[in-house]
Image (spheres, grey):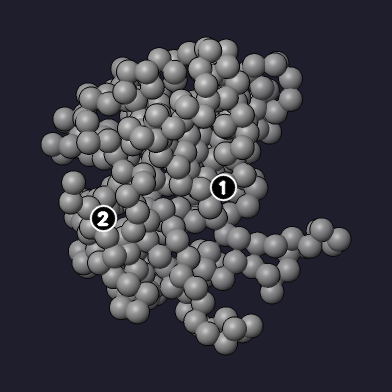
Amino acid sequence: RDVPVNVFSKKDPLEASVMSVERIIGEDAPGAICQIVLHTQGKLPYVEGQSISVLPPGLDPIKEKPYQPRLYSIASSRYGDDGAGTSVSLCVRRAVYVDPSTGLEDPNKKGVCSNFLCDAKFGDKVQIAGPIGKAMLLPDDESADIIMVATGTGVAPFRGFVTRLFAERTPGAAAFTGHCQLFLGVPTTSSLLYPELWEHAETTKPDQFKATFAISREQTNPVTGQGKCYVQHRLAQYADDIFKRLEHGAHIYFCGLKGMMPEIEQTLEQACNERSLDFKAWVKSLKKEGRWHVEVY
């Protein structure tokens, strides 16, 4: 498959401009997450599941050199949110540091790039490089089932997937005959990202799409009936369905903070044990067949 890679580099970036910056979680949701839409003049080809680098302006005061590029998963389909192929969207959590002794934010330790993007205004210039990545692409087989597991902004590539397969009217969407299952972990209902998209997919193609949320501060672990509900608990709850689909050629994707993987792997290992499967051999065979996709940061 012909996938565009590194059309623009750190040394020769594309100057994009900000089309919009919008907070996309509720006012009472913890933290701040913004949807950033950048205008690329149609010069940046990419496909769903890829990432771009953003080169923050200014110099790193410690190294006295330009800041290192920051990688962000693309949150739009190849046609962009404008549908014209002239934009790229990012889902960005504003990184702040809270001093544990005072409980206050320390402005000197805030994330350089995420704050630059979340504070950006219409028309501001943003230097970007890429696209990069082939690890999170949609399956070549249009009948393959897709299982997506995300926490927080890790849902970005899956917004691209679901937009492509369920929201757009394209040959790609028409050709897809598989089933998509999304498992998304967030702290509160007001933290749910892109709920309208998941609802649209479920309403228009209920036989092909299902979204299951793990809302840690509001839901109880469905397996034990006590404690908070995290995304790995939903995987345990739906293990029968997940394993059946994987047995029949499904692809499974994981995206989010790297801290989510040990608990998820532990849950899947337990599920393997219950099914008399060797976890390491099971994962190895999925990787070998290109059906185990991980992007964590």
At mark 2, the secondary structure is loop
Q: Residues within 10 Å of mark 1 (few under 14, many from 20)?
A: some
- Badge 2 density bin: few <14, some 14–19, many ≥20, Cα 10 Å: many
Figure label count:
2
Q: Tell whether 2 sits left or right of 18.
A: left
| Residue 17 appears in view | no
Find residue 40 and report its horizontal and vertical position in percent: 27, 66
Residue that badge 1 annotates: 257
**Mark closer to the chain start, 2 or 1:** 2
| Three-letter amino acid code at the position of disc 1 | Leu
Q: Is residue 291 above or below residue 220?
A: below
Identity, as a three-letter code, of the amino acid under mark 2: Tyr
Left or right: 49 in relation to 278: left
Say which quarter of the image contains residue 85.
Answer: bottom left
**Residue at mark 2:** 46
- Residue drawn at x 57%, y 32% is 265
- In-image side of 7 versus 69 (left or right): left
- Residue drawn at (34%, 68%) of the image: 129
